Image (spheres, grey):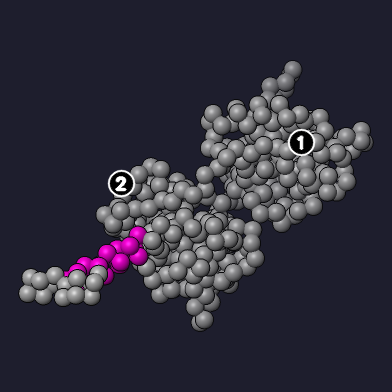
Amino acid sequence: MIRVGDGFFKAYKKVGSNKMERIYYIMYRKDGKLIEEKAGRASIDDMTPAKAANLRAQRIEGAQFTNQEKRDIARAEKEAEEGRWTIDRLWVEYKANKPTLKGIVTDQNRFDNYIKPNFGKKEPKEIIPLDVDRLRIKLLKKKSPGTVKNILELLRRITNFAVKKNLCEGVGFIIEMPKVNNSKTEDLTPDQLTRLLKTIEGSSNIQAANMMKMALFTGMRRSELFRLKWSQINFEKGFIKLVAPKGGVDQEIPLNNEARQLLSNHPRTKSVYVFPGRGGRQRTDIKKQVNKIKEAAGIPKEFRALHGLRHVYASILASSGKVDMYTLQKLLTHKSPQMTQRYAHLRDETLKNASDLAGEIIGEAMKKDDKVISLKNGNK
C-alpha cells in the first residue's frame, strides 16, 4: 500500500504469461462510505502513481463518477434502449430527479442490500404481492419493524415515482408495511442520569460528549445535530434554526443558557458544521463513540445514546408540571400533537401528585384540636 497525499492507493503486480504487470487501485470515501476500485493498468492504461492520485482526487470532488456509478448508468442506458423501466433503472432516474435528496447514503445502502437483489431486474408491474411478502417476512427475522418499514417505503417511493412521471405501470397492489410501535419512550433514573453526566464530563471525545449534552439540553434529533451549522445559531437573539427537521418546514428552537455556554466553548474548525465529520464534511455517524460513553456509565444497552437523551429532555419538561403539551410539541418540533402525547402521562402524574398534596393540606387544615371538620354537611 502506497501513501499519496492524504490518502492511500494500492498497486498490485499480476503475473501474466511471460511478464508481471502493475495494476493500481484507489481508495477513498464518498458520502461516508469507503470505496476501493480499480484505477487502471500500467501497460494498457498508462497508469502511474501520479495519475492514480489525480483520479482519486477527482472522485472525491465528484468530478468523475465512481466505477459502480458508471456501471449503473451504463445498465440504465441499456435498459432504456430496450424500453424497460426496471427498478434498477428507476432508482438511477429517481436520484437524478432529486439531487439534494436527504438520507441518500442510507437509502443507497437499503437499495443495494435489500431492494436491488430482490427486485432490481424487474419492472414494477412484474412484482407480485408474494415477492414483497417473502422479503418482509425474511427481514423481520433479523431486522426491527421500523427498519423493514423503511426498506419497503423506499421500494414504494421508487414505484410511485415511476407512476407519477408516467414512466411505466406501478406495482398494482398496496405494499403492506409492518406495524411499528413508535410510542417507545426512553428514560433514565436520577442515578443513571448522574452517572452518565459524570462520564460525559470525563470523556476525551469532545465531539461525542458535546453532542450528547446538546441532545439533553435542547432535545435535538441526531440528524439535526449532524446537519447543524454555525450559521444556524443566533447567539444574539438566542435561537437555533433547524433546517427541515425530519422533513418538515424550517423551525427555530430557543438557545438556552446551557446550550449557549456549551456552543461558545465548543472547538471551531474550518468546517461550516458544528460537529463535522471526516474532512470537515457533514457527519454521518457517531454511534461507536457515544455508545462507548454510554457503556462506561453503565447505562442499559437498549437505551439509545442520542435519541434516548432527547426523550429524557422531553420527560423532564413534561414531569415538571410547568410545560404544557402544546409548548412541548413546539420544542420537540413534532408535526402533530399525537407524537407528543406519549409524554402526557408524565404530566398527568405530576398533576395527580399536586392534587394529592392539595388534599393533604386541606385535610390538615380540617383538623383542629383533634376534631375533624366535616365539609360534607357544612357542620363543625
Point 34% across, 53% down: residue:
188
Residue farthest bottom in this picture: 236
- Mark 1 closeness class: few <14, some 14–19, many ≥20 residues within 10 Å: few
Horizontal and vertical percent position of residue 128: 76, 29
Q: Position of residue 69 (x, y in %)?
A: 75, 41
Which of the 4 quarters of the picture holds residue 208? bottom left
- Give the mark toward the camera: 1 or 2: 1
- Of the residues shown, which amino acid type is indicated by label 1? Phe
> Residue 345 — which label?
none
Q: Is residue 357 magenta?
A: yes
Q: Is residue 100 above or below residue 8?
A: below
Instruction: Choose between 11 and 205: the one closer to the eye.
Output: 205
Q: Is residue 213 magenta?
A: no
The relative height of residue 351 versus residue 162 in the rendered view (above or below) is below
Give the main secondary structure of the magenta stretch. Answer: helix
Picture residue at 35% right of the left edge, 57% below the top: 200
Q: CA distance from mark 1 to mark 2?
A: 48 Å
What is the secondary structure assignment of the residue under circle 2? loop
Element type at mark 1 = loop
Q: Which residue is mark 1?
A: 173
Find disc 2 in the rendering and name its residue.
298
